[in-house]
Image: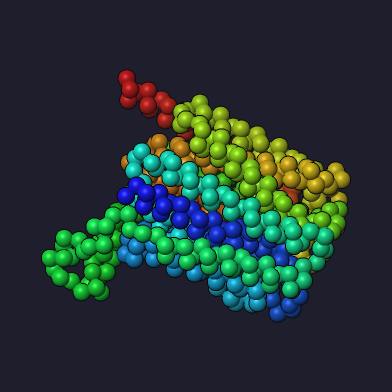
Amino acid sequence: MADKRTCNVVILGLAFLFIFTAFTTCGNVEQTVVKSLQNDTFVGSGYHSLGIIYGVFSFCNLFAPAVVAVIGPKFTMFLSGLLYSGYIAVFITPSTWAFYLTSVLIGIAAAMLWTAQGHFLVENSEASTINRNTGVFWALLQCSMLFGNLYIYLDWNGRTEIPDSSRKNIFLSLLVASMLGTLSFLALRKSHPEEEMLSEEEGQSLLSTPTIYKHRASTAMQDAKAEFKTILQLVKGRTILLLSPCMAYSGLELSFYSGVYGTCIGATTQFGAAAKGLIGISGIVVGIGEIVGGGLFGLLCKNNCFRRTSVVFLGMVVHFIAFYLIFLNIPDDAPVVFHTTTQNKSYLTPSVSIALLCSFLLGLGDSCFNTQLYSILGHVYAEHSTPAFAIFKFIQSVFAAVAFFYSGYVLLMWQLLLMVILGFSGTLCFFIAERMQNVSDDIQEY
């Protein structure tokens, strides 16, 4: 049994590795690819597409548990993978309507995929193996930032323009990777043989298959309503209110490192022919920062008050250093230029070393905030972890969507300033929430 469960976790991690090798790479280069299209009929924006994805994702999180309960996590993940693959396929022969339609569909798919993933991971873990299994899955997932971006670097290095043939080859390769991940879900096996049997109530009633699904849907809707009421109760609590600025900041910086910063590097005139290839290297270095930070703070650190506040403070400092260096190193109009490269000059002569150092710091800081937000939510809301994490993903995704929508219109300086203000406020509120929880724990022990 244990071997079957472990095998399931590894297959799950590999499936996500393949799918997110395709999607993460796509998100990193999307705006650059759209800008390079030699197609007068295509009027889409990569920023707007990512904004739609995160906006739809945030609201669909509220309904995803009911869908997973009805059709099961394995089939849910398979269908979601097909929608991810459809989004990647649009870039092979781009059209505006398909681009935005699949953006909506992949937002729905993302909510279903991640809800099913959490359900399946818990289903295949016990109290003694949940940390190990989470670590295995997380490590495989983070590697998705390495391989696709390496391909981008090798293919784009030395190019000033991206020809149609190069774009098609890249997205065909990413489509193959996404389909491999999707098909991998079919290899997942039941962790409990008895799950294949009907429940006692269903068996006694000798229900037909449609009636069984109707019964499950009814039960799932009741559970969803109960969970929604719990979410409303938690939102009114002081802890969630205090953590909300930090969650919102995680959404802004998510959009910046995953879609905006790579575009800025690719648009920097002073990087010359190396600019497009550096987008891939930047994505790899962000992934390395995520892996290093997650390993140090997510897996090795114990969940105590001192560690949490220290790691969040480190994340803030690391990000603020990165923002200052980006402000000096990257031209202010880098996120907003479309048909040309940057026209403005930066305060320093743009340096590849500084640009990649900032990529690493962005990944490292992101891992600091996310690991500790998961930690404090899991500690405070141990009895209601699912609604608490749903609130987190909702707030994070809404602010990521908003950030993607304004990224194509707001100069780099103002984007960085907004993140500094919200990052400082979020860190301060995190400290207050942690202190409140510390006092509460002391009173309970007393």
Q: Which residue is drawn at 13% across and 68% down?
A: 205
Tell me if I can see residue 374 in this picture: yes
Name the residue rendered at 59%, 62% in the picture.
22
The outermost residue toward the bottom is: 41
| Observer-nearest of 214 and 293 | 293
Is 239 or 1 nearer to us in this picture? 1
In this picture, is 130 found above or below 440?
A: below
Q: Quadrant of residue 407?
A: bottom right
> Residue 305: horizontal and vertical position, in percent?
47, 28
Describe residue 352's horizontal placement relative to residue 8 as left or right: right
Q: Which residue sits at x=56%, y=29%?
A: 310
Please give the count of numbered marks on the rendered protein.
Answer: 0
Q: Where is residue 259 in the image (x, y as percent from the top left)?
A: 65, 56
Residue 242 in view in this figure: no
In this rendering, the answer to whether 295 lies above or below 221 is above
- Write down the quadrant of residue 437 in the picture: top left
Protein image colouring? rainbow
Residue located at (75% from left, 62% from top): 155
Question: Seen in the image, is 398 located left or right of residue 259?
Answer: left
State the residue in front, 145 or 173: 173
x and y percentages locating residue 311 in the rendered image: 56, 32
